[in-house]
Image (spheres, coloured by chain):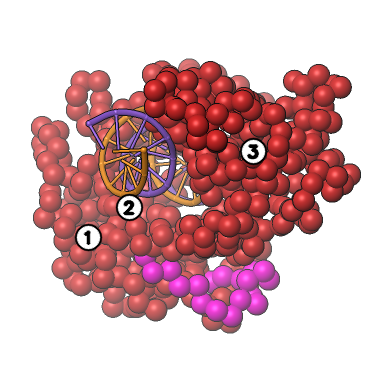
Chain colours: A red, B orange, C purple
Amino acid sequence: MYIYDDRKICYCHFNNIEQVDELLLGFVKKQFAGYLKKVSSRYQDKHCAAIIFVLCNLWEELAHIPAEYGGYDFWEEGELSPFIAPTRTTQGGCTFSCAGVAFSSAVLWKALEKSALSNLYVIHRGRFQNNKRSPSRIIPRWTSIKVLKDEYERYSNKSYNYKSSSSSSLTKILSTELIEIKQRRVPEDRRRKGTLISLPIAEFLDNDVVTSSAAFLEQLRTYTRSISISLAKLSDVTSNRSSEAELEFSNSEMGKKVAPCFHSFVMGNEISKRNIELRKFERQPFPLKRVFHLQENGSFSWGRLYGFPSDSLTRWQKLLLQIDGKPTVQIDIKSCIPQIACMKFSLDEDNTQDFYSFPSLMKYGIDRDYIKSIFMSLCNSKSIKKWIANQKFYNRENKFLSPCNYSDIINEIITNKPFFKNIIANPEMYKMLIKEESDFMISCMKSIMDYNIKFLYNYDCFIIQDDEDQINSVLEIMRNQSFYKWGKYINVDIDRYFLTHEDYINDDEALVMNF
DNA sequence: AAGCTTGCTTGACATGTCTA
DNA sequence: TAGACATGTCAAGCAAGCTT
């Protein structure tokens, strides 16, 4: 028997209960503490033994699940968790799962038979809610179900005619009297609200009627499907890194933030590997869609485009992104929302300025980063009063170096950049601006496709190959399009990333992701 | 802060298959 | 043909991570 940590048991086999040692008993006591509390103290040891015995037999059964169902792989890989969770009840029957392996109640009956116990305790994995320090995946909560031994015997010796009295068959009992894990419906008020609507790529008409542009959707799908995405070899990228980028990366620790699934895969989890492979398969075609909010008056707002493979890449993966095996650049709109607001509402204003810079606020200790961090909440608040209350609630005043009134900040912002008045405390306007941004990007996409440039889209940026001609073409398209829309040339950033992180330097193999 | 995504899990319900 | 149950599908909930 090996116990690596609280959650992983590699292999566990007991011929009889005498083989249970202190370690396993301690483990069960710790893991099942919640359950054991409910049991009166003089029966606790007995229950521990029962739990261990049943689990061991179940594991033994699981070891014989054919590899194509995943059972044996997981067993060998040490991914089995000691938790048995009933997952799906069917018409009468019950399906259970252990470490992601589903098995039927028949397996359970066999285990019961071997255990020769009068009671079978099956552990129901629940959740600790609202407890961020104890993620539900790690610390389970327990309830038990009890299977009556005599009912089991009647079932197993086949002499029991369940047909003539089906209401008292074992499975019926399971689903009525015995199972305390009665399925519950998600209460109506806790269900997800239907305000978000995703549609195939759609366009707005003047009167805010949404029309679906199926032709464009099909074009975009075909186009993006032809793009081959891969991640560069880290050694290649790090060889021509800049020290500035190196510093930025090591400071931000972004390299440590990897997708859980990928991280798990790197750690040798075969389940993750399989999931990634399955996902790759499901990825085609990209589920391109545009997300709208349905307003109370029946009109739509919002309208960003989602579903590009670049959406699901983490920051560090984006740094390594290659299109058709070539390095990429990211062309994004500088301070996107404020800039669009500026172009739309203040024709005299310079849209190449730094929208988050307010030198006059520096005396309060309010810097660019702070303005950036409050911008979203400022726009989305229903009223300035509410925003101020919220700021106080989150104790943001700690950030200030000298005493300062929140309304002073807002006055200062509006005085310096008057067009901010239009978007502060105006969520509808903010959504409208995002729609504007999204429509602009879609218009650009159409032209980029005409130029036959391979691209990915992500919020306010295009990712294209690091090629001078292509960059110039895309810049030209964006400039022309913005001039057509707002009468001004849009201000963009071109980012090239160079990655470096000690953890990854030793990786020799390219991480290829064929979406 | 808020809005989106993701993976993962569970719950509810639907469908398929075997057997008596 | 109905019971038993294996298998399939969809959606909700949650934590975490990204963007602006």
Give how far across and how far down residue A495 sits, in percent.
44, 65
Q: What residue would you read off at disc 3? A: A112
Image x and y of residue A339, in percent: 35, 46
| Chain of residue at mark 1 | A
What's the amino acid at mark 1? Arg
Image quadrant in which the C terminus of chain A is located: bottom left
- Residue A158 visible? The answer is yes
* Callout 3 secondary element: helix
The residue sitting at 26% across, 66% down in the picture is A225
2 and 1 marks on the same chain: yes
The foreground one among A296 and A477 is A296
Q: Which residue is mark 2?
A: A307
Which contiguous range is marked in magenta?
Answer: A498-515
Which residue bears the numbered disc 1?
A221
* Whether residue A97 is visible: no
Residue A512 magenta-highlighted: yes
Question: Of label 2 and label 1, which has the lower sequence position?
Answer: 1
Choose mark 1 or mark 3, whichever is in front: 3
Instruction: Work out which quarter of the rendered image holds the N terminus of chain A and state it.
Output: bottom right
Identify the subunit bearing mark 2: A
Residue type, numbered disc 2:
Gly
- Dominant SS of magenta comes to loop
Q: Amino acid at mark 3?
A: Leu
